[in-house]
Amino acid sequence: MANGLVIAANASLGDSIFLIVTFILLMWLVKHFAWGPVTKMMDKRAQKISDDLDGAAKSRSQAEQMAAQRQSELKNSKTEAIQIVNTAKENGEKSRQEIVTGAQTEAAQLKSKAKAEAEQAKTDALNSAREDVGQIAVNIAEALIKKDLNADDQKELIDAYIKGLTNADETR
Amino acid sequence: MDEKYQYLTIMGLKFNTANCISTLLTALLVFLFVFFTSRKLAMKPGKGQNLLEYLIDFTNGIVKGIMPGDEGKPFYFYIFVLFTFILFSNTLGLFLEVKINGVTFTKSPTADPMVTMPLAMVTLLMSHYYSVEKWGFKGYLSNYIRPVGFLLPINLIEEFTNFLTLSLRLYGNIFAGEVLIGLLLNVASSFGILTAVVAAPMTMIWQGFSVFIGAIQAYVFAILSCVYFSRKLERE
C-alpha cells in the first residue's frame, strides 16, 4: 500500500471511473429506496385526486338536478294543493246541493205520501161508514120486521137512530 | 492555489483521495437524504415526503419544460439523481474542507474536471443511446447531416463542444467558489484575530452566494442535459 501512495499534481483518471461507479450505485439505491415508492405514491395520489374531482363534479351535477327536480315538484305541489282545495270545495258544494235537493225531494215525497195515506184513510172511513149505514139499515129493517110497529113508532125510531148516528159522527 | 492531494495508484489508475472521499460522501448524503425523506410514505405527505416530492416535481418540471409528453419519461429519474447529486456536491465544499498536514481530503467533488467530465460523459452517452434507440443506427448517423449535408463538420464539433462546455462550466464555477473560500480562509488566518473578524462576514457572504451559484449550476446542468437529450430525439 505504501508504495502505491504517490503525491503528484496531475489528472487522475481513476476519479472519473470511481465517480461513474458511485453514481450508478447511487442511482440504483435511490431508485430502489426512494424513487420507486415515492413516484408510485405520487401517481396514486394524482389518480385519487382526479377520481375525486370527477366524483365531485358528478355528485354536484346530481345535486343540482335533484334541486331542480325538487323545485319543480314544489311548484307542482302548490298547484296541486290549490287544485285539491278547489275540488274539495266543489265537492262540498255539490254534496251540499245534493243533500239539500235530496232532503227536499224526500220531504215532498213524504208529504205526498202522507197526503195519499190521509186520502186513502178518508175514503176507507167513508166506505166503511157507508157499509155500516147499510148494515145498520139492514139491522133496523130486521128489527122492524121482527117487531110490529106503527108509523109513528117507526118514525120515532128512525129519527132517534139518525140522531144517534149524527151524534156518533160528530164525536168521531 | 497550492492545494495538495494524496494520490493512490491502483492497477495503473491514479486516484485522488480527496475526490473519491468527497464523491462517496456526497453519494452517501444524497442517499441518506432520500432514504429518510421517503420513510413512512402516505397519501397525505408528511414533512420529509413533501420535501422529496417537491424536489421530484421540480426536476420532472425541468424535463417537462423541454420535452413535454411521453418522450421525456425515461429521463425523469436520471435528471432527479443528477440534479440532487450535483446540488449536494456543489454545496459540500462550502462547509466541509478537511485538511491534514496540508493535504486536502474533502472538498466539492465537482470542483475537479475529472469529476465533472464523467458526469457530462454519462449525459451525452445517454443522449446518443436514446437517439440510436429511437431512430435506429442509420437514422442516428443521418442526424449528423441534418438539416443539410455541409453541416456535418459543425455537427461533429458540436458533440465535443457540448461535452466540454457542459463539464467545464460546472467545474469552473465551483472551482472558482472554492478558490475564493480558500483565499478568504488564508486572509482570516494571516494576522490573527483582526483579519479573522474582517474575513468572517466576507466568507459568510461568499458562502451564501456560492450556495446560490451551486444551485444555479446544478439547475443549468440538468436543463442542458435535457436539451441535449431532446436535440437527439427531435428532427427539425
Image: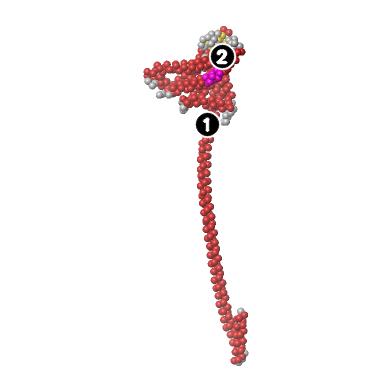
Seen at 45% across and 18% down, the residue is B162
Seen at 55% across and 77% down, the residue is A123
Q: Which of A135 and A121 is in front in this view?
A: A121
Q: Locate the N terminus of chain A and report the quarter of the image it occupies.
A: top right
Q: Is residue A47 magenta?
A: no
> Looking at the image, do the residues carrying marks 1 and 2 touch, with CB atoms under 8 Å apart?
no
Q: Does the magenta stretch include residue B206?
A: yes
Q: Name the main secondary structure of what is drawn in magenta.
A: helix
Residue with the most extreme bottom position: A150
Residue B90, x across and y down, in percent: 54, 18
Residue with the most extreme top position: A3
Residue type, numbered disc 2: Leu
Residue type, numbered disc 1: Ala
Q: Nearer the viewer, residue A58 or B139?
A: A58
Name the residue tied to disc 2: B184
Q: Locate the C terminus of chain A and report the quarter of the image it occupies.
A: bottom right
Question: Mark 1 belongs to which subunit?
Answer: A
**Residue range (magenta):** B205-215
Name the residue tied to disc 1: A46
Residue A136, x across and y down, in percent: 59, 84
Question: From mark 1 to mark 2, how far is it between C-alphas?
Answer: 49 Å
Q: Which of marks 1 and 2 is in front?
A: 2
Q: Nearer the viewer, residue A125 or B102?
A: B102
Residue B215, x across and y down, in percent: 52, 21
Seen at 60% across and 87% down, the residue is A159
